[in-house]
Structures are given as C-alpha cells and as structure tokens.
Image (cartoon, helix red, strand yellow):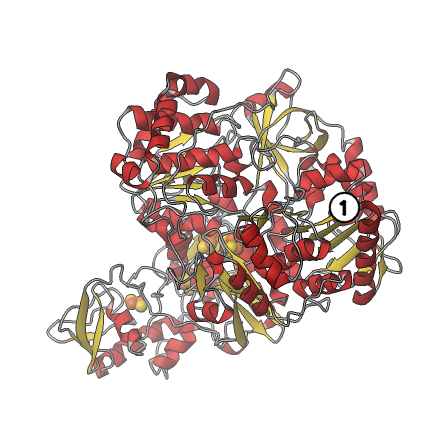
Amino acid sequence: MSLIREIDYGTPAARSIAEVVTLTIDGFAVIVPEGTSIMRAAMEVGTAIPKLCATDMLNSFGSCRLCLVEIDGRPGMPASCTTPVAAGMVVRTQTERLKTVRRGVMELYISDHPLDCLTCAANGDCELQDMAGAVGLREVRYGYDGAGHTHEAKDRSNPYFDYDPAKCIVCSRCVRACEEVQGTFALTIEGRGFDSRVSASAHESFLTSECVSCGACVQACPTATLIEKSVIEIGQPEHSVITTCAYCGVGCSFKAEMRGEEVVRMVPEKSGKANRGHSCVKGRFAWGYATHRDRILSPMTREKITDPWREVSWETAIYHAASKFKRIQAKYGKDSIGGITSSRCTNEETYLVQKLVRAGFGNNNVDTCARVCHSPTGYGLKATFGESAGTQDFDSVEHADIIMIVGANPTDGHPVFASRMKKRLREGARLIVVDPRRTDSVRSPHIEAAYHLPLLPGTNVAMLTAMAHVVVTEGLVDEAFVRSRCEWDEFQEWAAFVADARHSPEEVARICGVSAQLIREAARLYAGARNGAIYYGLGVTEHSQGTSTVMAIANLAMATGNIGRPGVGVSPLRGQNNVQGSCDMGSFPHELPGYRHVSDSVTRGAFEALWGRKLDDEPGLRIPNMLDAAVTGSFMGLYVQGEDIAQSDPNTQHIVAGLSAMECVVVHDLFLNETANYAHVFLPGSSFLEKDGTFTNAERRIQRVRKVMAPKAGLADWEATMALSNAMGYKMTYKHPSEIMDEIAALTPTFTGVSYAKLDELGSIQWPCNEAAPEGTPVMHIDEFVRGRGKFVITEYIATDERSTRRYPLLLTTGRILSQYNVGAQTRRTANVVWHGEDRLEIHPYDAEQRGVADGGWVKLESRAGATTLRASITDRVAPGVVYTTFHHPETQANVVTTEYSDWATNCPEYKVTAVQVSLSNGPTEWQQEYEDHSHASRRIAGLAEAAD
Ligand code: SF4
Ligand code: SF4
Ligand code: SF4
Ligand code: FES
C-alpha cells in the first residue's frame, strides 16, 4: 500500500545523464544532469516551486507565470520550468518580489473560477487549491465574477470522464498531454484571452471527437475540469496499490487508487517501465467488469449440458470434478484428460495448471491459447536466436531510426506502445508498414508511413524474402555482423536462396500485389538504418506459414546487423497480458517451464525430484488434437482455466463437437462464457484485482499483480487449482503465490534470480534474471545469441491452401479494435461498448457495389467452414478483394467462418486468411439461431433467473 500522489518534478528528466552541473538553490548546493530545469532541480532537493502549467509528464510550456524565480546576475524573474540549470547559478525561489507576483497571478486565476471547493469532486486533489495555499492567497481584489466560462455547460458525453469548462484555467496541460503523450491531437485551445477554452476536435463533444479516451488529459488536468466520473461518484481515494493491467501484452503498471475495497480510479504509474505513466482506455477505465452483475460467484455443477446449473459449495464442486476426472482416467486411460492454461491468468496460476496436468493427471496434455496467437514466435525465434521471446524493451523504440511494423495494428492492439512509437516518429524516425489494411499507423495526425506495403493476406513470407533479396543482391548485408555473430555457412546458403531471381521483388510483386519498386525502396530504407527495429503481431503468426514468417523476420534483422543493442531487434507485440508468461511457464504439451523439451531427461529429472512424481517423456495433445480425440472418443475430460475456446478458437463447429463429446468439462472463469455452455462444472474465477501474482509482458518484463480486494467467490484461482489437485490425490500446499514463484525460480534457469522481494525492490524484472544478469536483461543477444551463433533458416514461400475461388472470391482477415479486448468477455461488460457495440465487416466500396451491399446493411459472410451474418462497413481501409472483421462479440461467431488450416510447425490457426463470399443477408444463419437457443438453455441456473450474457 502506498500514498496516493506520486512526486511531480514539474518537467521531464534530462535526456542525458553524462554531464552534471552544480548550482545553488536557496543556499543549498544541488548537482543535477545538464539540461535539467531549475524547477526539477529544486524538486530534487525537496523544494516545490509553485506551478500550474508544468508537470513532469510534459515538456515545459511556460504559460502560467507562477513558477518564477530570481537568479543572481540575471534580470527579471525567469520561469523555473523553462530555464535550464547552469554551472554556478545561484537561484532564489522565495523572495518578497516573487511572493507578490505569484499572489497577483493567483488572484487572476481565482477571480475566474467558481468557488465551490467544498462540493467540488477534486477537493483535496486540486493543484489550483494547493497553489492558492502555497502562495498565501488571502484576498481577490478583482471579485469573483470573471468573464470566463462559469456559465458554460458540462460535456458529459464520455462514459468515463466529464469536462467542466467552468473550472478550466487554460493551462494547456490537457492539449499537450493529448499531443505529446498520447499522440492523438484531439484537443485545441480555441478563442483568445478570456474567451479561450479547450475544444475536442472541431468543437465537438468528447464522445464524437477524435478522442480515444486514453485519459492522459484527465491525468494531466490540475483542476476538476477533466475528471473521472468514478471520482465524482465515489469521492477521493485514500490509499493505493501498485498492480499491472490485465488486458494487453504492453503490461502497463497502474496505481489502483482505492477507498476501502472499492476502486476509485486506475492511474498509470509514472515509474512503470513499460508504460512510463501512460495507458489506454481499457486499462485506465474498463475495469468495471470485475464487479459486473454477470459474474458468477458460486461454484456450480450439472450432469448434462442440457440441465440447468446447480449452485454448490466449493468442496462439492471440486470433489465432483476430481471424481469425474478420476473415473474417466480409470475408464479411458490416463491420457484421456487434460488442461488449458490461460494467458490472462498469472504466471503462478498457469504454472500450477501445467503442474496439475503433468504431475496430477500424469500426462502432458496441457496447452494454452498462445497456441492460437504467438506459438510461431516461440518456435521461430528459438530456432534462429535461441530464445523464444522478443529481443528488446519498449524503451528501445526511442533509439530506433527506422521502424518496420509487420502484421500489427499497435494503435488498436497495443495502444501505449503505439503512443511511444508515434512520439519517436514525430522526432524523425521513419516507418514502414507491411499490412493488408491501411491501419492508423499508416496515416494519422503528424504521422505518415514512409512506405505502406498492402500485401495480399497470406503472402508475408514471399514479401520478406523479396526484401531479403534486395538486401543481399544490392550489397546491403552487414557482413561484419554476420561473420562475427552468425553461422557463416548457413548464412551463405540462405543468401544464395534469397538471391535467386524467383525471389526478386519483380517476381514477388505478382504474388503479393505490391509493386516491386515499393518493396525495393522499403528494403533499402530498413537495411540502411543506423538502428532498424521490427515489431510484429498476429498478422505474422496466424498463418499457415506463421513460423516461417517469424524466421524470415529474424533472418532480415540478422543480415542487416539489427540485433543486440537498443533501437533495433525483433519484437513480437503480444496480444494478451500474460501470453509471454503462459508460454514461459510450460503451457505447451511438449515443453516444461523455460521451454525445455519433455524428452530431456535431465530437466525432467529436476522436476520429478521436486514434484515427487514420474513425468511423461512424450509430448501431450495440443488443443485441436484434444478436440479431435474427443470426437473419436479417447479424450473425455478437460479443465479450462480462463479461456473461451468456443469463441476464440477457429472452426467453432469443430470445437463445439469436441466439447459436446466430453464427459467432464470444467470451466474456471469469471463469467458463463461460450465454452461454459458445454461444461459440467463451473468454478468461479477471480479478477486481477482479487489476487496476488505476476504477469510477464511482451518485453519479458515480470511485474507484480497485487490484490486490492478479497476474491469475490472466496478462492483466488491458484487456490482453486490447488484444491482440485489435492482432490485428485496430488498434494499441493502453497500458502501464497510467492512460494509458487520461488519454485518456478528453483526450476527455471531464466527465472533463477526472480522473487517477490526482488520484484518489490526493482519494480519489475525482464528475464533472463540469473547470476549473469541479477537485475534482468532489457536487451537480449548483446554480445552473442542465446544459441551461440545466429542461425539463418531458409524460408521457402508455400502459398496457403486457402485460396480465393470462384465460389469464395474474397479473402477475410481478422483483428481487434482499441476499445474491445479478445473475446470481449471483459470489455463487453463495460461502457466501452459505446465505441464498438458489434463486430462489423469492412469491405471495399468496389466489392460492396458488386454485391449491392449498403453501408450498415446486413450481410452473410460464408466460407467452406460455415456462415455467419453481421453488418457491413464500406471503407477503403481494406483493398479490393479483402474483407476484415473483429471477433469481440459472440453473436457474430466470426470463428464459425475460419478454417482448420494452421501453421505447419505449431498448429497456430490461420485466422488471417479465409476465402469467403459476401452476400446480402436475410437475418441470422440457422447455425447462429441454434447456437443462440443452446446458449440460452445452457445458462439456466436452478432457482435463479437465467444468467445473462
Ligand atoms: S482522453 Fe486521450 S485522446 Fe482523448 S482528448 Fe484526452 S488525451 Fe486526447
Ligand atoms: S482542461 Fe484542465 S488541463 Fe486542460 S486547460 Fe483546462 S485546466 Fe488545464
Ligand atoms: S490494455 Fe494494454 S496498453 Fe492499454 S492500459 Fe492495459 S496494458 Fe496498457
Ligand atoms: S509552471 Fe512554469 S510557467 Fe507555469
């Protein structure tokens, strides 16, 4: 628990700490880095110079004139926020002259400010109030009827914060936060003098403006002008707890500001190394799902999936699940059950589920939802670099000169990283976007990609090989790097392969649909970078050649020497908050924690010694194989923690057939999700606010998740798994998740130095953390690759079998949107639905016209796997021949359409390419109707009104 307010130093830290300067402030000697402002230098020694327009998240602006100081030998009273320190400078922050001027300034502010401090929501957390006190304001000679905006109406349109112009002091902090921190440029100050006011877009409401609700302006506002609705409703928080966002793989660190057990607001932590004080709408505002009425707070069981649920005690539910699992194993063999871990749960919970499967069930039938997103990353980066993770920290982007984004949409999927990247682009870095869609990264305020390569879905490998062709044939290889750091023979074979004429941009242009000239110029730009960085997402991995694409990216980075220092690297933008961690923790059927193969007897021996059980040396079943085996009758029991495979996995009809065939499906979740429609036992899950643990973000950064309220259903998830294990006869006795982390550290070489004590001390740790790197590893492969020498792998382009045909002439690709998250189970239960209440099909005007499709009209989307209906949005963000949709809403059933094709190495589904036809629709398909009816029926709880979705 900590105090509410973080120290505000007034201006950002100096960029370089190489040179320091000594000066005197109020008689005290101060030593600070060159370039530090006088305001910050004073704060470093505990002297808070009065200020209003300055805050350390923003560059100094110098508009309020409250922070004036006197400097010996200099005329006037310079603003301390805009004046840098100089050697030998003698500064006075408090003189009679300064006091008089500051009071005068405050008098003017207060004369145009409503005096309702006692009933103002910011009472106790208002910098204007604080400054009135700090300067000793005792009278206002001009009266209180300023000609300002006290009559103006509030804007309450945003679901999470209000804008009250009456309280605005026009300090511009909000405008600058929107520009400098978020990079959206949604706000301006319009008008002059007393008429000036903050305006969203062109005098629109916040809701209809370009605002993306990140909340940076609210955080920056020193008054109650921009304030969270939750603070207005609840009041000021009284304590705070530092924890980690449970949404995306950026892993923003937050202060959960609390009043008792009630969250008042989430404030991004300035010292959070992933987010540096910023956040997006999801982490800052969309936490209401944790207390949503749909949460199931009692364990439930039923014999058949057509029966209504019956609420039971934890003991009964656990006993029921364990005895069913044991009966299934007795009847069908020990391999007939398995488990699915969650990338939304903590490392400790994930570790326990795989331990339960391996030691308790006695097989390796454990898999994770990373199977459907980033499993090719693990495989591809391990093969080339020797470690299954991204190479950089997010700070690295600040040193990149050329940034290449492949198959990722960071402004929607990884918004805080996108803001940091956009800041770097505004500083002059250049951008290459490889994506079938014209995403916001391609063009947004003050950002324009140097090159956008709008390739056809499914042609990544051909495109990247063509770029490599340019690098090799135009003499752009960093030979010194390759000779000293990589396998030279393999490089030569690879270079000969990519140099073949069939990989030239001129040949590949026909496959990718992108001109040869664009490919050549983009390749030259990347190869010529002083620091070239590649960031990629699911548009790379969710293909039949996902692993090949990851390896093609790694090849390109090695060939150009862009590995092993800040500003370069290969960084997968992970989708879910703990997808890196769930993979690290041994969630795949062939790997023990730390990515060690189950057939490795030495590793297995270490686990066997500590776990006290003989472990299977054969890889277990992957999720699709579990479902196949269920249909054929050899896999009959499944424990699913925190995942919704019926909505998130491809080919829904196949998933449903597999789940329906099982004798015992145990779903452990917050809500009755789609998978729970096929479950026999429901164990209520706990939200991230209700448990201790750790998440590992896309930078390999391990961060604490801290409990701010008691588990609403009585048990945290790790406690429920432990109870199930004990009931199965495999004893687990942890008293706190820190003990689970100690066990992980003891068994996993990359985690050797990790403990809760060290996490508390350092704030976060990027693995590997061990004797060689006791405080972790921000950038990997610095002097040598983890595997020794970097390995070039030949990546032959093999077109997916999923091709457009006469019957299915369009290519469907899928993705996500800023306000929603994954299957939407959380975000659909928040006010975020105002921005995205349904999944829509994006279709190019040409394709729409051919089919008579109207904007907003209902269409049928059909592939050879199935059909669904949704409404259309006509847009040229997609090219002709390509359609796009999100999959956040279960009604859409977007995955009814996606096929069973998957990555050759990892089975990661090919979500990003499905041949489809779009036609006008007469309403929901038969399948959608049946599904809806079944969902309704299967959510009945005996004695209660039907649980709503
Ligand atoms: S919420 Fe974010 S995007 Fe919206 S105006 Fe404020 S800073 Fe800009
Ligand atoms: S809304 Fe707040 S931050 Fe913006 S100008 Fe007004 S007082 Fe300053
Ligand atoms: S969703 Fe991602 S970017 Fe947004 S606050 Fe959470 S971790 Fe940060
Ligand atoms: S804080 Fe320096 S001028 Fe406003």
Specify the farthest residue to the left: 73
Kind of element beneath mark 1: helix
Q: In terms of image quadrants, where is residue 843? A: top right
Q: In terms of image quadrants, where is residue 487? A: top left
Q: Nearer the viewer, residue 135 or 944?
A: 944
Q: Nearer the viewer, residue 82 or 131?
A: 82
Q: Going 32% across and 34% down the picture, which residue do you hit?
A: 488
- Specify whether 220 is left or right of 898: left
The answer to whether residue 715 is visible is yes
Q: Position of residue 703 (x, y in %)?
A: 50, 62
Tell me the amino acid under the disc marked 1.
Ser
Q: Nearer the viewer, residue 272 or 778?
A: 778
Residue 787 position (above or below residue 112): above
Residue hosting label 1: 336
Q: Position of residue 126 (x, y in %)?
A: 45, 73
Q: Position of residue 608 (x, y in %)?
A: 62, 58
Q: Going 80% across and 57% down the picture, which residue do you hit?
A: 321
